[in-house]
Image: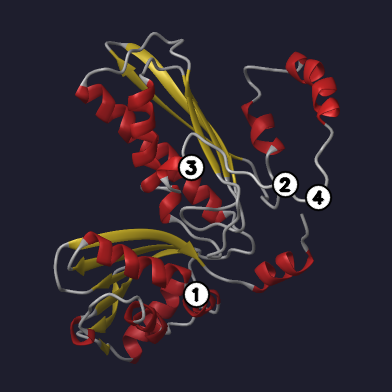
Amino acid sequence: MPEDQVLAASTGVIGAPFPIEKVEAAMPALVGQLDENGVTDLARAIMTTDTRPKMAAREGSVDNVSYRIVAVAKGAGMIRPDMATMLCFVCTDADISVTDLKTALNRAVDGSFNRITIDGDTSTNDTVILMASGASGSRIASDTDKETFQRLLGDLLMDLARQMVKDGEGVTKVVDLTVRGARSPDDARTIADTIAHSPLVKTAFFGEDANWGRIIGAAGRAGVFLDPDRLDLYFDDVQMVEDGTGCGLDAEEKVTRVLKKPEFSVTLDLNLGEGTATMLTCDFSLDYVKINADYRS
């Protein structure tokens, strides 16, 4: 999501507005039910087509004073980088400035929620909020402590991002996609995005079909320079394409076994430079179609 969407919410209202009087009337009872151990309740309350709650926590320390980062999230459909139907609420008891907090969140979001896709579709309401109370007294001020906080936050958000993809609508395959050897990181990102969003690639994953031509075809239409005679393609550690040419039936049989796993990796090496990018994607299944043929919000 863009930086101006981090720490902010973009919402759309469909139909008649909900009477604010009902919200105000319900607030005292809701406040009275607050519980410091109610994280699971919160994670369940924000679910829509999710099949399970999504939570994560990490712990760090400064000068032997510990702090925690705890988060809940929801999202199972209409998920694609920059705008998606997802919510994520992150809380920490660390003492950290607003400026450092926003910087850390932007970096962490770019490496997690902005690197996943379930169906390539988006909505008008995605939100990631990071709140710091300072209650632990653990002060995040030095460069070393900021980097530690950044690493913990990035790891936590990637954990939640992976939970989202694994619980995506109708998902049966989770795929770690890497494009490397591009002339620049931006080129690698563009190609990775195109492959990760391709319906033909995603349906091939669902069908456990070692159709490497679909992946090469998606890369070729990404609008980024590549040399088809230099492409290498791997499924996990099995090479399927070398120098733009398929490696034969033996390789295809091995790749088919890889595709039967619920989680695997795909790596495309352009052999042009040092640019690298990653995406976390998934398959398109019959259940995805059924869910969205019948679902109305």
Instruction: Give neighbour class at mark 2: few <14, some 14-19, many 20+ (Cα, 10 Å).
Output: few
Using the image as rendered, state which of residue 18 and residue 161 is in the foreground.
18
Image: 211 above or below 144 = below
Please name the residue shown 68% across and 50% down the image. Answer: 51
Tell me, yes or no, whether the two marked residues, 2 and 4, touch with CB atoms within 8 Å. Answer: yes
Task: Give the residue at mark 1.
Answer: 205
Q: Which label lies toward us, 1 or 2?
A: 2
Residue type highlighted by circle 1: Phe
Q: Secondary structure at mark 4?
A: loop
The answer to which of marks 3 and 2 sits earlier in the sequence is 3
Task: Give the residue at mark 2.
Answer: 13
Q: Residue furthest left?
A: 273
Whole-angstrom CA distance, mark 4 to mark 1, is 38 Å
Image: 124 above or below 186 = above
Task: Give the residue at mark 3.
Answer: 5
Using the image as rendered, state which of residue 42 and residue 221 is in the foreground.
221
Whole-angstrom CA distance, mark 2 to mark 4, is 7 Å
Whole-angstrom CA distance, mark 1 to mark 2, is 36 Å
Please name the residue shown 60% across and 49% down the image. Answer: 75
Q: Is residue 241 visible?
A: yes
Task: Give the residue at mark 4.
Answer: 15
Please name the residue shown 55% across and 53% down the image. Answer: 84
Residue type highlighted by circle 3: Gln
State which quadrant residue 228 falls in. Answer: bottom left
Instruction: Give neighbour class at mark 4: few <14, some 14-19, many 20+ (Cα, 10 Å).
Output: few
Whole-angstrom CA distance, mark 3 to mark 2, is 17 Å
What's the colour scheme?
A: secondary structure
The answer to which of marks 4 and 3 sits earlier in the sequence is 3
Residue type highlighted by circle 2: Val
In the rendering, at what x and y percent does residue 287 appear?
A: 68, 69
